Amino acid sequence: MKAKMNTEVVWRPSSEEIEHANVTAFLRQVGISDYHEMISRTSSDPAWYTEELLKFLDIRFRKPYDSILDLSDGIAWPHWCVDGEMNIIDNCLDKHQATARAGQPALIWEGEDGSSRSYTYSELASEVNQAANALRSLGLGKGDAIGLFMPMVPEVVIAFLAIAKIGAVILPLFSGYGTSAVADRLADGNARALFTADGFYHAGKLIPLKETADRAADSLSHLEHI
């Protein structure tokens, strides 16, 4: 027996919402008349669609790609932006600093206790630059693996972006891991450093992190404490 599909439309955008949607702006930029035509074009010419989307989103490459799509290994193994190189910081933060967006919110956080913090693009870039410079001062750089054993606080975003900025490898570690799980993953990734916090609240209970991180780091003599 086939399951009956529910085709009821639960929400439709207003004409004003459609007019100001990013999809509408993209359609106009590439000269496509409507959404259905765009979907058809994406299926028939994915290389064209992807390249036009990169232009629309102003995705910047430090080294331009030679070709947008290489299917020489077959359609199941596509190679995108062949030989291109980028750092996500250029697109996430740096390109916005000389624009009106610099003063707009980039990160908004709310804690379990109702407290909140927010950072503009400019403020977030400043914090990320400070953290990146601190990492460089420790001799860390391109290709080094750096662990993130952090709760969901603004600092984890800052650390994440700082690691990316210096070209290092981000090694995420679930905040619920125990000592052996953290140590094993740091060892497997040949991590050189680890970001952590004292702890965090979950369902009103304080969950310690640094004690676990310290025990894991003690078993890895090459790891630097940050």
Image: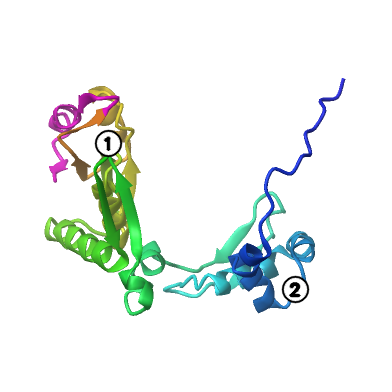
Q: Residues within 10 Å of mark 2 (few under 14, many from 20)?
A: some
Q: Which residue is mark 2?
A: 32
Name the residue at 32% across, 36% down.
173
Label 1 or label 2, whichever lies nearer to me, is: 2
* In-front residue for pair 173/155: 155
**Residue 144 visible to an observer of this rendering:** no
Q: Position of residue 221 (x, y in %)?
A: 13, 36
Above-or-below relation of 37 to 213: below
Specify the segment rendered in magenta: 202-226
Q: Quarter of the image holding residue 194?
A: top left
Q: Left or right: 117 with respect to 27?
A: left
- Of the image marks 1 and 2, the number of the one nearer the N terminus: 2
Q: Position of residue 89 (x, y in %)?
A: 35, 64
Name the residue at 14% across, 46% down.
226
What type is the residue that disc 2 sits on?
Ile
Q: Position of residue 209 (x, y in %)?
A: 19, 30
What type is the residue that disc 1 sits on?
Leu
Name the residue at 31% across, 48% down.
109
Can residue 209 be found in the magenta stretch?
yes
**Residue 207 visible to an observer of this rendering:** yes
* In-front residue for pair 166/57: 57
Above-or-below relation of 216 to 119: above
Q: Quadrant of the N terminus?
A: top right
Q: Which residue is mark 1?
A: 186
